[in-house]
Image (cartoon, helix red, strand yellow):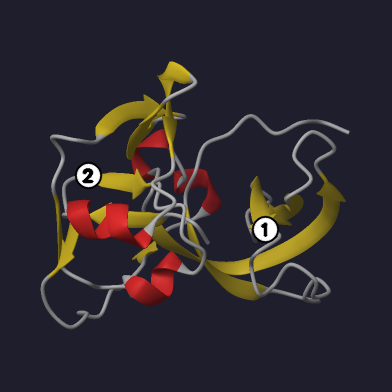
Amino acid sequence: NDAIYIDDGTATAKVLTGIYNSYAIYPEGSQITIYLPALSAKIENYQLVIGIIDNRDNSKLAQMDSQVILDRHITRHSSPNSVEPQLCTINELTTFLCGKLVRLSDITFIDTYEDEQNPTGKYCTLSDTNGDMAYLYIDSYSMGYNKSLPKGAVDITAIVTYNFIPQS
């Protein structure tokens, strides 16, 4: 993935690294400092996003796209701490959880479909034991992208995002 999520316990932000496998450079639980003066931030889909100003369009953020740029703005301080996802139900998924790592239990995959407007991933329809439904987006870079959907109830750990789901 070309972004990392940071969480200080009060809020979460998505950092547009632009570096493939950023999670290997900044493993889950890493303590980091971000030098913000040369970066920009904005709210997108109920989530704080940090990146650089896009030279083509000052109203947009762009990915940093270079380890040199990342090293100027992000410092990792220590070995990673363990991170526990927040347990919740589909009904509890709200915009307040955007960017948070959550764990859903007893989830059943209903269906999957490609997003014609964004061919870099696919959507899966999920249901829980209460009949509540949600969508799971699987990025084409994800290890699970080309795997078949699990049969029966499973537990899922994911980062909450809020997007308008295109209807097919």
Q: Looking at the rendered structure, which numbered label has been put on residue 138?
A: 1
Which image quadrant: the C terminus?
top right
> Mark 2 sits on what residue?
11
In the rendered image, residue 42, in percent from the top left (x then y), is placed at 32, 26
Direction from residue 163 to residue 114 in the image, left or right: right
Dot 2 amino acid type: Ala
Q: Residues within 10 Å of mark 1 (few under 14, many from 20)?
A: some
Whether the residues at callouts 1 and 2 have beta carbons within 8 Å, the answer is no
Dot 1 amino acid type: Ile
Dot 2 lies on which element? loop
Direction from residue 89 to residue 123 in the image, left or right: right
In the rendered image, residue 94, in percent from the top left (x then y), is placed at 44, 38
Direction from residue 10 to residue 50 in the image, left or right: right
Nearest the viewer among 121 and 70 is: 70
The quadrant where residue 117 appears: top right
In the rendered image, residue 103, in percent from the top left (x then y), is placed at 46, 66
Q: CA distance from mark 1 to mark 2?
A: 24 Å
Nearest the viewer among 20 and 115 is: 20
In the rendered image, residue 109, in percent from the top left (x then y), is placed at 76, 63
Of mark 1 and mark 2, the one earlier in the sequence is 2
Q: Is residue 80 above or below residue 4?
A: below
Q: Residues within 10 Å of mark 2 (few under 14, many from 20)?
A: some
Q: Is residue 16 above or below residue 48?
A: below
Please report the residue visible at 66 percent of the width from the left and 57 percent of the height from the top: 139
Please report the residue visible at 49 percent of the width from the left and 69 percent of the height from the top: 21
Dot 1 lies on which element? strand
